[in-house]
Each structure stands twice: as structure tokens, then as C-alpha cells.
Image: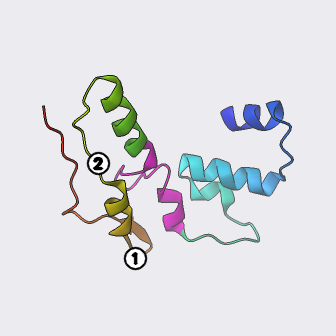
């Protein structure tokens, strides 16, 4: 609904198929774009809302924003390293277990 609102409010000219794709990526739901002329590999739906392991850009955003607002300036997340060491294995977005988030209290 928020996407619909932003599209309408900002008079964004977007075709319905592209809008459905964006909605499905946000929801992490490949079913919304099935039977379309364009094929996307299933791992792409794990970027924003990862239903397989819950590691996604939403969680990274929460970690960064929330740690800042509660005063945890020592919460260090090396996002570049996380993304640089990620791989697609068996059509799944996988992260290196050795890459950790450091929080010092």
C-alpha cells in the first residue's frame, strides 16, 4: 500500500508489471511475478525480505539505524565485507558464517 501511495503521490509513471515486480521484491514473494514474460532467479527475492534465513537488507537497516538511536556507536557492521563474501548457492543467497557483527558495550 505504501508503494501504491508513493507512486500516486509522486506521479510516477510505471507499468503494472514493473510495479508488481517491485512489490514482490519488497515482500520476498516470487509468486507475485510468476507467469510473467520476464524470468527472475529466485534468489533475487531474498535480498529485501529473506524468508529463508531472515538475513536481508531490512535487518541490516534495522541494525544500523536502531544501534545509532540507542547510542551504540560501537556497533560495527562491515556491510561491504558481508556483500563481497556472499554467494549464490543452489539458487539461494548465502552469507559467509565467518563474517560477524561486532557489538561492544
Q: In this rendering, is residue 90 above or below 64?
A: below
Q: In this rendering, is residue 47 above or below 70?
A: below
Residue linked to disc 1: 90
Q: In this rendering, is residue 102 above or below 32?
A: above
| Badge nearest the viewer, 2 or 1 | 2
How far is mark 2 from mark 1, CA to CA? 26 Å
Where is residue 62, by image quadrant? top left
Q: In this rendering, is residue 103 above or below 82?
A: above
Residue lying at 49% horizontally and 66% vertically, measured from the top left: 43
Image coordinates for residue 97, horizontal then vertical, percent: 21, 62
Image coordinates for residue 16, horizontal then vertical, percent: 82, 52
Tag 1 secondary structure: loop
Residue 25 part of the magenta-drawn span: no
Over which residues does the magenta segment extend?
A: 42-58
Residue lying at 68% horizontally and 56% vertically, measured from the top left: 21
Where is residue 94, by image quadrant? bottom left
- Residue closest to the eye, 87 or 91: 87
Furthest-front residue in view? 73
Image coordinates for residue 79, horizontal then vertical, percent: 36, 54
Residue 105: mark in rendering: none
Where is residue 33, by image quadrant? bottom right
Image coordinates for residue 19, horizontal then vertical, percent: 75, 50
Tag 2 secondary structure: loop
Residue linked to disc 2: 77
Amino acid at each position: 500500500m505504501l508503494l501504491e501511495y508513493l507512486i500516486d503521490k509522486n506521479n510516477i509513471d510505471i507499468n503494472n508489471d514493473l510495479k508488481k515486480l517491485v512489490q514482490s521484491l519488497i515482500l520476498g514473494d516470487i509468486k507475485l511475478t510468476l507467469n510473467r514474460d520476464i524470468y527472475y532467479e529466485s534468489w533475487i527475492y531474498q535480498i529485501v525480505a529473506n524468508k529463508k534465513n531472515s538475513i536481508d537488507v531490512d535487518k541490516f537497516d534495522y541494525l544500523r539505524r536502531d544501534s545509532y538511536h540507542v547510542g551504540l556507536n560501537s556497533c560495527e557492521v562491515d556491510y561491504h565485507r558481508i556483500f563481497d563474501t556472499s554467494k549464490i548457492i543452489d539458487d539461494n543467497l548465502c552469507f559467509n558464517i565467518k563474517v560477524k557483527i561486532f557489538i561492544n558495550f
